[in-house]
C-alpha cells in the first residue's frame, strides 16, 4: 500500500483487505486478476462512487469451472462489505429502480408461470426442486433475483455448501426461504445454487417464458 500513500492519491481514507485462510483454497495470480477485473466492473455498474483507476484491470483467463468458484468468492466479499455498511458493489437505488419489475407477491404462494404475461424479454424463471424464483438478466451479464422469489423447501443436497445462504439470511436478504429484497448475483449458477440448495448449472436451469434457457438465449 505504500506506493499508493502519496500526495496525488489523497482520495482514499482506509483499506479493506480479505484473506482466505483455507490452505486448500488459496487464490492464484490469475484468480486475483480475474477478481480484480470483476470488482472493477461491478463497482462501475453500481454507480455508487467515482473510480480513479488509470486503466481497467486485466481480466485473466480462468477455466469455466473456476469462474463458478470465483463468483462465490466475490459474492461472499460483497455480502461481508454490505454487512459493514459498505455496499460498494450493490446497485445504487436509481440503478435498481431501472431494473426492478413487479415483484412476486409474498403474501400468498404463486407459481411463476402465472405471472409471465407481458414480462420483459430479459426475465427468467427457476423452478428446480419445488422452488419458485424470478430474475432479470442484466445487459452486464449479472442476474437480479427479485423479491418474493422462493428457495426450494427441500433439505440442502449433501454436496451443497450453505455458507452463502446463511450469510444472506444474516444480512436480511432471505427470510424463511424467501427473498425479502432484490439481490444482484454475478453468476446465474451462484443464484441458482442458492435457490436450488445444490450445485447447478444456472445457464441451463434458468429459462424464459418460452422455455429457452439462458444458455440458448445468450450463449448459442
Image (tube, rainbow, N blue to C red):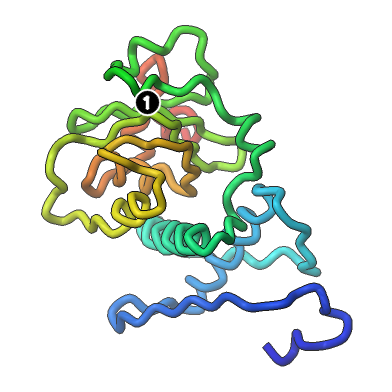
Q: Is residue 18 above or below residue 169?
A: below
Determine whether, in the image, residue 165 is placed left or right of residue 215.
left
Q: Is residue 24 above or below residue 136?
A: below
The residue under the point 38% across, 28% down is 148
Name the residue beneath numbered marker 1. 125
Q: Position of residue 43 (x, y in %)?
A: 65, 56
- The image quarter containing residue 213 is top left
Query: Farthest residue toward the bottom?
Result: 2
Question: Is the residue marked by circle 1 packed among few (<14), some (14-19), or many (20+) residues within 10 Å?
Answer: many
- The image quarter containing residue 155 is top left
Q: Position of residue 153 (x, y in %)?
A: 17, 35
Nearer to us in this view, 177 or 156 = 177
Nearer to us in this view, 165 or 40 = 165
Q: Is residue 16 above or below residue 40?
A: below
Nearer to us in this view, 153 or 119 = 153
User: How many marks can you see?
Assistant: 1
Determine whether, in the image, residue 49 is placed left or right of residue 214.
right
Q: Position of residue 107 (x, y in %)?
A: 33, 20
The residue under the point 80% across, 69% down is 54
Nearer to us in this view, 219 or 122 = 122
Amino acid at each position: 500500500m505504500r506506493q499508493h500513500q502519496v500526495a496525488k492519491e489523497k482520495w482514499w481514507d482506509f483499506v479493506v483487505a480479505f484473506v482466505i485462510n483455507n490452505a486448500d483454497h488459496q487464490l492464484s495470480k490469475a484468480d486475483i486478476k480475474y477478481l480484480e477485473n470483476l470488482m472493477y466492473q461491478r463497482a462501475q455498474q453500481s454507480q455508487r462512487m467515482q473510480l480513479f483507476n488509470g486503466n481497467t484491470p486485466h481480466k485473466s483467463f480462468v477455466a469455466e469451472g473456476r469462474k463458478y468458484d470465483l463468483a462465490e468468492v466475490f459474492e461472499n466479499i460483497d455480502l461481508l462489505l454490505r454487512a459493514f455498511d459498505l455496499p460498494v458493489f450493490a446497485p445504487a437505488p436509481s440503478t435498481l429502480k431501472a431494473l426492478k419489475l413487479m415483484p412476486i407477491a409474498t403474501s400468498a404462494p404463486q407459481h411463476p408461470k402465472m405471472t409471465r404475461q407481458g414480462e420483459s424479454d430479459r426475465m427468467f424463471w427457476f423452478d428446480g426442486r419445488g422452488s419458485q424464483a424470478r430474475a432479470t438478466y442484466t445487459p452486464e451479464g449479472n442476474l437480479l433475483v427479485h423479491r418474493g422469489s422462493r428457495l426450494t423447501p427441500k433439505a440442502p443436497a449433501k454436496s451443497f455448501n450453505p455458507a452463502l445462504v446463511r450469510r444472506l439470511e444474516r444480512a436480511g436478504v432471505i427470510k424463511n426461504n424467501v427473498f425479502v429484497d432484490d439481490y444482484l448475483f454475478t453468476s446465474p449458477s451462484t443464484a441458482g445454487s442458492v435457490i436450488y440448495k445444490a450445485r447447478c448449472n444456472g445457464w441451463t436451469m434458468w429459462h424464459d417464458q418460452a422455455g429457452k434457457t439462458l444458455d440458448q438465449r445468450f450463449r448459442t
